[in-house]
């Protein structure tokens, strides 16, 4: 007797299958897909559009205003959910699809799950070339969606209905696997979306996916235990993997029991609450003086859940001691000539706790780090105290922090703000710091804030964004109003790309093409950001300084809908305390003496790289 089947289109089958996928979390079993973001066009409206309308609330559909923006929101949703849940994004072919490629790269770099379902050309090729089709004169199989290949963990083009039976489960294995997770692209040929097939009913059975926690190899773990016991000045660098494994409580207990200090990457910030005695704060180029001093003095550095990008390592000039890399991904565990310990962050930390017993760091190492933290706190207070000069980013950050609740999530992505936030924001609880700095993508901020709010509507979300990023991508502010998902946006207007202007001058260049005043222009634009935000449906105001900002933040907290506060800041000011060198290549030859001086400094620091 043949198995029971049901006749559905490919698109209908895909969305029904997606609705059946669940994940086991600490809070119980929940749908894996939080919904589908959709901007419809001729490549997906007839197939995916009809299917999504038919499935209803079983797999809710959300409309956005920009394809890149909706993809950022989906990625932020996954990050805020610690990679336990994800969303999907569907577009037409052509520009709708390629608008998501930047977001796919962001998800790939940050190891965050998202399912891309772009429409594709006709599998039959009968009406070719269709509207928006890319024609490759040497390869008839190429479409615009091939742009997704290098920025997808798994890519497939669905040219027959039955291919979904294999492709969909393979997609889920990638989306739910802690080692290989990231963006998945299933390019859906538009004629195939509408094609019917007799599907086995078993394909749509409810399935629950469970978090995999790989245990470390005994030999690798033993080597780490021996190294810790032999160390006098060990240091842990907590990366995003600690939070994704929900290992923050285990790390806090381990640090407290052993006295090993903990520094944090951008992705790992919040792994410890800011005032735990072992917390040294941010590490690296945007690090605190306490963390960077410990990194330089440490005889053993233990990376946990970090991919050790250049901002973390000071472009390989910061660490002096032996390096161990604990990571669920072998690719990351092998970096920088360190000794790898492949395993889930929480599982490794819990095992280390058992193996080390009552071992503790020497008292002198505890005391040295405690003094360094006190010194850093003095420097941070000096940087954030309001003055009579034009407002700095640091002063704005401190004002936002003072007005925030312990449940507030701060969201940011690019420019100078992530560096200042990494140093200065004091995280009250895990998940309260959401900064996308793997791809440092301008335009992520507002869309990302929306995704964070969707992940946990009960928490207040404060987006901090510069004028440059706001101008690049602001349309999902209107989406937040439309969906009734309130976010507060603090827009710092320094009239250009202030961060890159400072970097330009630090490498010997003259101010050129970054601040609006230094660009080719006839008239400088007088942009009324508050008026623009109001035109998108938000409540908005511009304030004159820190005192007025704090009062506006109180009004924003009481507002029922998205609220934008604009404040002018000085593009020249940045926190001088803390920080470390970053490898930005300076021209070897230039007519400017300033460049020659910068190059000489650069050559000196290059010699320090390991």
Image: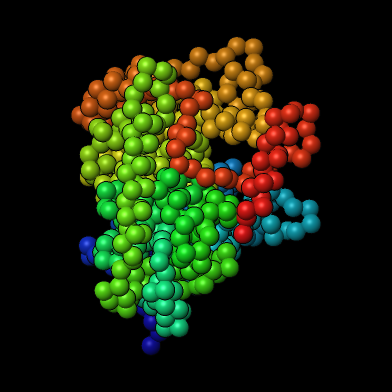
> From this viewpoint, which residue is outermost toward the left?
558
Quadrant (top left/top right/bottom left/bottom right) for the C terminus: bottom right
What colouring does the structure picture have? Answer: rainbow
Residue sitting nearer the eye, 190 or 367:
367
Is residue 237 shown left or right of residue 315? left
At x 50%, y 66%, the residue is 323
The answer to which of 374 and 204 lies nearer the viewer is 374
Q: Does 119 sit left or right of 289 as displayed? A: right
**Residue at coordinates 23% horizontally, 43% vertically from top-left?**
406
- Residue at x 42%, y 59% (from the top left corner): 237
Q: Quadrant of the N terminus?
A: bottom left
- Tell me where residue 30 sits by quadrant: bottom left
- Do we see residue 376 in this rendering? yes
Q: Is residue 598 above or below residue 254?
A: above
Towards the viewer: 541 or 532: 541
Report x, y in % for residue 230. 42, 74
On the question of residue 55 being in view, the answer is no
Percent x, y of residue 517: 59, 18
In the displayed structure, 250 sits above or below 571; it is: below
121 on left or right of 490: right
Q: Position of residue 272 (x, y in %)?
A: 31, 54
Seen from this angle, which residue lies furthest top? 523
Residue 151 horizontal/vertical position (percent): 58, 56
Q: Residue at x 34, y 74 (%)?
A: 352
How many dots with numbers?
A: 0
Residue at the front extreme, as displayed: 364
């Amino acid at each position: 007797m043949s198995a029971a089947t049901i006749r559905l289109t490919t698109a209908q089958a895909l969305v029904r299958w997606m609705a059946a996928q669940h994940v086991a979390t600490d809070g119980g079993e929940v749908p894996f897909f939080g919904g589908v973001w959709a901007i419809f066009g001729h490549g997906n409206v007839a197939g995916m559009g009809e299917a999504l309308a038919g499935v209803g609330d079983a797999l809710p559909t959300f409309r956005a205003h920009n394809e890149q923006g909706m993809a950022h929101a989906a990625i932020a949703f996954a990050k805020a959910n610690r990679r336990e849940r994800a969303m999907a994004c569907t577009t037409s072919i052509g520009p709708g699809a390629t608008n998501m490629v930047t977001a796919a790269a962001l998800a790939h770099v940050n190891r965050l799950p998202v399912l891309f379902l772009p429409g594709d050309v006709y599998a039959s090729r009968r009406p070719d070339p269709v509207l928006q089709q890319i024609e490759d004169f040497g390869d008839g199989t190429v479409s615009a969606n091939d742009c997704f290949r290098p920025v997808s963990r798994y890519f497939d083009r669905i040219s027959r209905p039955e291919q979904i039976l294999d492709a969909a489960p393979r997609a889920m294995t990638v989306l739910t696997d802690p080692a290989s997770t990231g963006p998945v692209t299933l390019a859906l040929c538009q004629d195939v979306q509408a094609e019917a097939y007799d599907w086995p009913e078993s394909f749509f059975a409810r399935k629950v996916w469970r978090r995999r926690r790989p245990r470390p190899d005994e030999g690798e773990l033993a080597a780490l235990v021996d190294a810790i016991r032999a160390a006098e000045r060990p240091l842990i660098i907590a990366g995003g993997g600690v939070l994704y494994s929900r290992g923050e409580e285990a790390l806090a207990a381990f640090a407290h029991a052993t006295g090993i200090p903990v520094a944090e990457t951008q992705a790992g910030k919040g792994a410890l609450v800011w005032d735990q005695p072992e917390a040294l704060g941010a590490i690296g180029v945007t690090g605190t003086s306490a963390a960077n001093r410990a990194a330089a003095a440490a005889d053993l550095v233990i990376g946990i859940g970090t991919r050790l990008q250049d901002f973390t390592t000071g472009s390989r000039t910061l660490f002096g001691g032996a390096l161990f890399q604990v990571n669920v991904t072998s690719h990351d565990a092998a970096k920088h000539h360190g000794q790898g310990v492949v395993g889930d962050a929480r599982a490794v930390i819990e095992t280390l706790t058992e193996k080390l017993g009552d071992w503790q760091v020497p008292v002198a190492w505890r005391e040295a780090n405690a003094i360094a933290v006190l010194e850093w706190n003095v420097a941070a207070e000096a940087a954030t105290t309001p003055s009579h000069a034009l407002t700095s980013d640091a002063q704005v950050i401190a004002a936002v922090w003072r007005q925030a609740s312990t449940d507030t999530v701060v969201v940011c992505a690019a420019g100078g703000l992530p560096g200042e936030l990494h140093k200065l924001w004091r995280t009250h609880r895990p998940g309260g710091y959401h900064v996308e700095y793997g791809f440092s993508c301008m335009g992520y901020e507002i869309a990302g804030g929306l995704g964070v709010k969707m992940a946990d509507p009960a928490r207040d979300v404060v987006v901090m964004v510069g004028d440059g990023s706001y101008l690049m991508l602001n349309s999902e502010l209107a989406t937040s109003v439309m969906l009734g998902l309130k976010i507060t946006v603090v827009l710092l207007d320094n009239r250009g790309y202030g961060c890159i202007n400072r970097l330009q001058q630090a490498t010997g260049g003259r101010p050129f093409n970054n601040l609006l005043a230094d660009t080719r222009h006839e008239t400088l634009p007088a942009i009324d950001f508050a008026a623009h935000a109001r035109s998108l449906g938000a409540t908005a105001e511009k304030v004159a300084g820190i005192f007025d900002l704090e009062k506006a933040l109180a009004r924003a907290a009481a507002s029922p809908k998205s609220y934008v506060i604009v404040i002018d800041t000085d593009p020249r000011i940045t926190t001088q305390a803390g920080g470390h060198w970053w490898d930005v290549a300076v021209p070897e030859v230039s007519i400017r003496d300033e460049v020659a001086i910068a190059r000489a400094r650069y050559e000196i620091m290059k010699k320090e790289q390991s």
